[in-house]
Image (cartoon, grey):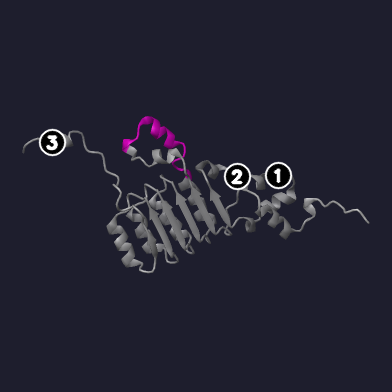
Amino acid sequence: VRPLRAMHITQLNRECLLHLFSFLDKDSRKNLASTCPQLQDVFEDPALWPLLHFRSLLELKKDNFLLSPALRSLSICWHSSRVQVCSIEDWLKSALQRSICSRHESLVNDFLLRVCDRCPNLASVTLSGCGHVTDDCLARLLRCCPRLRALRLENCARVTNRTLAAVAAHGRALQTLHVDFCRNVSAAGLRRLRAACPRLVLRAEHSAAMIPDQLPSAPGTALRKLLPR
C-alpha cells in the first residue's frame, strides 16, 4: 500500500479554501491569512464576508474583517454595563460618565458611514445597545442601502421619530422595522409610519411607553413656577 502524501493547505483550490475560512471567526481568519500571501488573498475575497457580527464596539476598530458590496447582514450587539451609561441623557451625565462615553461615542456612527460607502447591497442590519447611533446616520444608511429589508434597533437612545420619517421616505424595500426600547420614539410617530407604510412589519416594544429625554430646565425655572404671579 502506497503511503498517503501530506497535502499543504495552499494546495487546496480556492473554493475549498473559502469553505475552510468560513468556519473560522474573524481573528482566526486574520491569523491564518498572515501566514502567506495566498491565504491573505483568500481573506480579502469579498465572497468570504456576506455576514458580520460584532459583540463589542471595540471590535469595530480591528482590521480582521472586510467591508464590501458582498455584505448582506450586519449586527452590532453591545451587551455591557456601559450601555446604561451611554443611555443617560448627556446633560445628566457626570464627568466620569462623559469620559467613559467619549472613548466610543463616535465608533458606531463612523463605522456605519463606512458601511454606507462600501456595502450598497446590505439587506439586514441589527443594532442593539448602540446608544450613540443617530437619526442622521440611520437616514444615510437607508438612502445608501436601497435593498435593506430588515432594520432592527434595540435600546438605541438617540433614535427618534426622525428615523421613522426616514424609513417612510427612503425605506422602499424595508419589510421589517424594530424599534424596541428606543425611548425617544413616540406613539404619534409610530402611527404616522404605520399610515405611510401599511405593509411594514413594525415592532416597538416599550418604546412609546418609556419616558423620553427632557431638556434641562433653565436655572430658577422650577422656583418661579412655585411663586405666585
Residue 123 lies in the magenta-colored region: no
Answer few, some or many: residues within 10 Å of disc 1's Cα (few below 14, many 20 plus, some between 14 and 19): some
Helix, strand or loop: magenta stretch? helix
The C terminus lies in which quarter of the figure? top left
Instruction: Look at the image and say whether residue 96 sits in the magenta stretch.
Output: yes
Circle 2 — which element? loop
Res 34 label: 1
Label 2 crowd (10 A; few <14 / some 14-19 / many >=20): few
Q: Is residue 62 above or below residue 99?
A: below
Residue 224 - label: 3
The image position of residue 143, as x and y in percent, is 44, 60
Identify which residue, 122 or 120, lies in the foreground: 122
Q: Amino acid at mark 1?
A: Ser
Marks 1 and 3, Cα distance to the nearest angstrom?
Answer: 67 Å
Tell me which residue sits at (42%, 37%) in the image: 101
Q: Are marks 2 and 3 in contact (CB under 8 Å)?
A: no
Question: Measured from the top left, where is residue 200 in percent x and y?
Answer: 39, 66
Earlier in the chain: of badge 1 and badge 2, it is 1
